């Protein structure tokens, strides 16, 4: 046997060198893994976005606008951020929400008239790209909690089909704060609380919706890693929309308000303020706050008959007067350059789409045809806003001005049509803008609103169908200048007509009886099937039927064959 002799020292050195090289490669791999882990844990440059949309909060119904309602959290967040004091929304729920989601005016989505009703086969048009879809493309985790009110007649209209990864909330415009039931007339009542695309029976504990939605939002924050992926949370509270319901402990604070509607309303606002306090604490607790932009906005003006106040502005919810469209709004964020300031630049709810997508490092394609502008620099740095005008709306269905005419509009515009336009300092209204009184705080000093106040309305048969105001000089719309400056009126009518040329047909279908929750297990939800879906179902049925017949025929043939064989 031949044995190769190797010196022991050489053998040991070989073993040590191999072991060392293996150890080095392991250390390198381990270091690489740790570096990759650090990359994952590295905070994203994209900010987290929390958009809080409240329902029917009046212009005066926040502490820093002089209200008797206590809102310490909102006051502090606004004081440390940027107050938006020239900020506009739409006069009703669905219109504001549609413009937030698309960055487009109502005339460009077909939602010019009224709201989307629960019984209508209607929703935010599917061809419109939404804000959460664009943020999702930019890498965001997208979540919605609260009120949708953008239609649900078919599955494709639901929030989780329009860009949200998750949805917990209601589909309709209002409902009971505890039971989450809503009636749309006799025999048209149903349950309205959803988790994703299914009724949330199991998650429902009968909790007051403001608290329930806040808990859900906090749960989303707790279960997401803020260092790995940017988050978009759209928190659309039901509060403070009617019905006026609130836990009793919040009413104790407002015993001094004799008017019951105002007292309940004030208590609801305080509950909302407390909810946002808890949400803010959660943002800090779970590591979001330092890289978060919080936007707070009302969806329209307050409704005095339901306790809301827009004083000293004129009009109320559902009108084109300032009280219906000038909203409470502010931005709070450590990322703001100029904190503790007021922004007097003209800003509209359509502006959030391009502003937030750009802030989130997303892309804005030209074919989006946006009506909104990126106003982040105007808000954060105090620079001039790129926005110079706002089309408040053109509603060709609402033609109630008895004396409205083409003649009154100098042959440029039919002033019977309800419309409103803002250009620079000027605001033009045509048609019937809506209830036009100023409702002072003293109105709520009685047990209930007096009949004298309730009947104090302008009589439109006096021949008025056009108004002009300098909103900068006269924000309360007390001095009509339409007769004094006819040349300004004509210029604005021409601008209105130009906008109208770009309008799409109005989408406002008739009531569909198939929407009745009785046909859907007692739940408000999708009921409509388009032609393609029905065709697919028919094809499946026909295939099943054909296959069934084929099996029967095959069995018959096989039996005949057996009989033939026996005969043979």
Image (tube, rainbow, N blue to C red):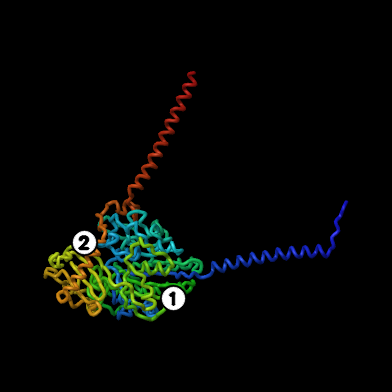
Q: Contact, CB < 8 Å: mark 1 with mark 2?
A: no
Q: Is residue 417 left or right of residue 34?
A: left
The quadrant in which residue 368 appears is bottom left
x and y, in percent, of residue 502 in the image: 26, 61
x and y, in percent, of residue 205 in the image: 40, 63
Say which of 206 and 424 sits in front: 424
Badge 2 element: loop
Say which mark, if any, is on residue 396: 2
Say which mark, if any, is on residue 335: 1
Query: Does residue 294 appear in this view?
Result: yes
Mark 2 or mark 1, which is nearer the start of the sequence?
1
x and y, in percent, of residue 455 in the image: 16, 71
Q: Residues within 10 Å of mark 1 (few under 14, many from 20)?
A: some
Say which mark, if any, is on residue 279: none
Q: Is residue 193 above or below residue 564?
A: below
The quadrant in which residue 233 appears is bottom left
Q: Residue at x 17, y 64 (%)?
A: 414
């Amino acid at each position: 046997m031949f044995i190769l002799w190797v010196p022991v020292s050489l053998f040991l050195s070989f073993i040590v060198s191999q072991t060392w090289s293996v150890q080095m490669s392991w250390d390198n791999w381990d270091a690489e893994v740790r570096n990759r882990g650090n990359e994952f844990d590295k905070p994203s440059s994209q900010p987290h976005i929390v958009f809080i949309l409240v329902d029917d909060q009046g212009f005066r119904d926040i502490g820093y606008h002089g209200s008797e309602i206590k809102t310490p959290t909102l006051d502090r967040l606004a004081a440390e951020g940027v107050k938006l004091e020239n900020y506009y929304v739409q006069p009703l729920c669905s219109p504001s929400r549609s413009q937030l989601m698309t960055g487009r005016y109502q005339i460009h989505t077909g939602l010019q008239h009224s709201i989307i009703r629960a019984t209508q086969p209607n929703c935010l048009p599917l061809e419109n790209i939404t804000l959460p879809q664009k943020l999702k493309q930019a890498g965001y985790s997208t979540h919605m909690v609260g009120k949708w009110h953008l239609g649900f007649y078919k599955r494709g209209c639901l929030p989780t089909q329009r860009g949200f990864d998750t949805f917990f909330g209601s589909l309709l415009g209002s409902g009971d704060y505890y039971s989450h039931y809503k009636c749309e007339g006799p025999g048209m009542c149903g349950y309205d609380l959803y988790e994703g695309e299914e009724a949330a029976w199991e998650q429902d504990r009968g909790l007051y919706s403001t608290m329930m939605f806040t808990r859900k939002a906090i749960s989303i924050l707790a279960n997401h890693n803020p260092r790995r992926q940017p988050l978009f949370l759209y928190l659309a509270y039901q509060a403070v929309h009617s019905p006026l319901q609130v836990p009793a402990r919040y009413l104790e604070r407002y015993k001094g308000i004799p008017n019951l509607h105002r007292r309940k309303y004030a208590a609801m606002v305080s509950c909302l303020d407390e909810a946002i306090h808890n949400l803010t604490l959660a943002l800090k607790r779970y590591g979001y706050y330092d890289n978060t932009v919080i936007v707070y906005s009302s969806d329209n003006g307050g409704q005095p008959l339901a306790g809301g106040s827009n004083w000293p502005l004129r009009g109320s919810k559902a009108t084109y007067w300032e009280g219906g469209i000038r909203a409470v709004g502010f931005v709070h964020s450590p990322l703001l350059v100029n904190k503790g300031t007021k922004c007097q630049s003209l800003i509209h709810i359509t502006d959030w789409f391009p502003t937030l997508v750009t802030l989130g490092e997303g892309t804005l394609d030209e074919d989006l045809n946006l009506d909104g502008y990126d106003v982040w620099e105007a808000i954060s740095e105090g620079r001039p806003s790129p926005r110079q005008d706002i089309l408040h709306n053109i509603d060709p269905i609402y033609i109630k001005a008895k004396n409205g005419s083409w003649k009154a509009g100098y042959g440029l515009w039919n002033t019977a049509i309800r419309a409103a336009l803002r250009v620079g300092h000027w605001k033009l209204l045509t048609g019937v803008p809506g209830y036009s009184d100023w409702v002072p705080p003293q109105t709520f000093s009685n047990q209930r609103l007096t009949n004298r106040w309730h009947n104090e309305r302008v009589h439109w048969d006096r021949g008025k169908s056009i108004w002009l105001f300098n909103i900068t000089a006269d924000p309360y719309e007390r001095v009509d200048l339409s007769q004094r400056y006819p040349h300004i009126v004509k210029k604005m009518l021409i601008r209105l007509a130009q906008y109208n040329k770009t309008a799409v047909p109005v989408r406002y279908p008739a009531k569909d009886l198939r929407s009745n929750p009785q046909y859907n297990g007692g739940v408000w939800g999708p009921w409509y099937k388009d032609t393609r879906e029905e065709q697919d179902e028919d094809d499946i049925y026909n295939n099943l039927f054909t296959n069934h017949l084929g099996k029967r025929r095959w069995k018959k043939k096989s039996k005949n064959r057996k009989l033939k064989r026996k005969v043979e």
